[in-house]
């Protein structure tokens, strides 16, 4: 039987009810449907380090890194489900001044092991395993390592040695029921913050 609960509700179980209302609302999309949600906002910062420049050719190939820097960058994030599968699709559209809109696309699935784990995939089956938790109303993702999907196999990749470890959170704004903040950092033990961005979003039309 198909599980049509939202992906993060499946991963979090009872923890789903501990998320802030605005977080639940923009992820309340049923798999195997045409559901679509859009949030709009501004990235206060999009930053990458000198070390990240070394990684950019790899990032461009796999569609895994945003190649530009900026402040106060307008952004839209589109979340979609599709009738034929249980995946959650992301399209982050960054509007850097003087450049064409940059799309950072990925899709997310429950990990084969189940539990509170998902995998976010970019091109060619490259994925990041993420532990998902609800913490003080926020949705928090913690990096569990990289994998390469080959058919039904998920082969571990030691990319953390180059890329560092990711942390992501989406946190409700206590002063506005329709707003939330988002923060992502990719931190290397030797090179510091390889990549980071943070911003503020408003739940748009659905």
Image (spheres, rainbow, N blue to C red):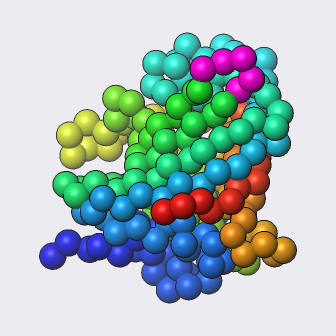
Is 44 situated above or below 115?
Answer: above
Residue 9 placed where, x, y %?
A: 45, 75
Seen from the viewer's position, the closer of residues 4 and 205 is 205
| Boundaries of the magenta span | 96-100
- Evaluate whether residue 187 shows in this view: no
Report the side of 170 relative to 47 (left or right). Answer: left
Residue at the spot 56% in from the left edge and 47% down from the top edge? 77
Report the side of 9 relative to 82 (left or right). Answer: right
Seen from the viewer's position, the closer of residues 192 and 31 is 31
Residue at the spot 39% in from the left edge and 30% down from the top edge? 123
Report the side of 189 relative to 66 (left or right). Answer: right
Main secondary structure found in the magenta portion:
loop
**Membership of 176 in magenta stretch:** no
Residue 171 placed where, x, y %?
A: 72, 66
Is 79 situated above or below 176?
Answer: above
Residue 95 placed where, x, y %?
A: 66, 31
Q: Quadrant of residue 200?
A: bottom right
Q: How many marks?
A: 0
**Membership of 98 in magenta stretch:** yes
Residue at the spot 48% in from the left edge and 63% down from the top edge? 206
Going by the picture, which residue comes out furthest to the front? 205
Residue 113 placed where, x, y %?
A: 35, 63
Residue at the spot 45% in from the left edge and 25% down from the top edge? 62
Quarter of the N terminus within the rendering? bottom left
Q: Quadrant of residue 131?
A: bottom right
- Evaluate whether residue 97 shows in this view: yes
Is 129 situated above or below 96?
Answer: below
């Amino acid at each position: 039987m198909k599980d049509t609960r939202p992906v993060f509700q499946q991963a979090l179980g009872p923890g789903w009810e501990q998320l802030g209302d605005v977080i639940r609302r923009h992820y309340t999309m049923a798999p195997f449907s045409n559901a679509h949600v859009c949030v709009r906002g501004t990235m206060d910062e999009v930053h990458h380090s000198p070390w990240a420049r070394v990684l950019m050719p790899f990032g461009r190939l796999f569609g895994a890194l945003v190649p530009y820097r900026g402040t106060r960058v307008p952004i839209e994030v589109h979340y979609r489900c599709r009738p034929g599968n249980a995946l959650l699709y992301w399209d982050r559209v960054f509007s850097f001044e003087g450049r064409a809109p940059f799309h950072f696309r990925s899709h997310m699935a429950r990990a084969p092991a189940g539990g509170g784990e998902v995998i976010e995939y970019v091109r060619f089956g490259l994925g990041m395993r993420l532990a998902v938790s609800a913490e003080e109303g926020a949705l928090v993702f913690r990096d569990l390592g990289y994998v390469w999907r080959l058919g039904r196999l998920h082969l571990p990749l030691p990319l953390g040695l180059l890329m560092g470890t990711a942390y992501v959170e989406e946190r409700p704004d206590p002063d506005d029921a329709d707003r939330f903040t988002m923060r992502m950092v990719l931190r290397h033990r030797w090179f510091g913050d390889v990549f980071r961005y943070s911003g503020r979003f408003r739940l748009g039309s659905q």
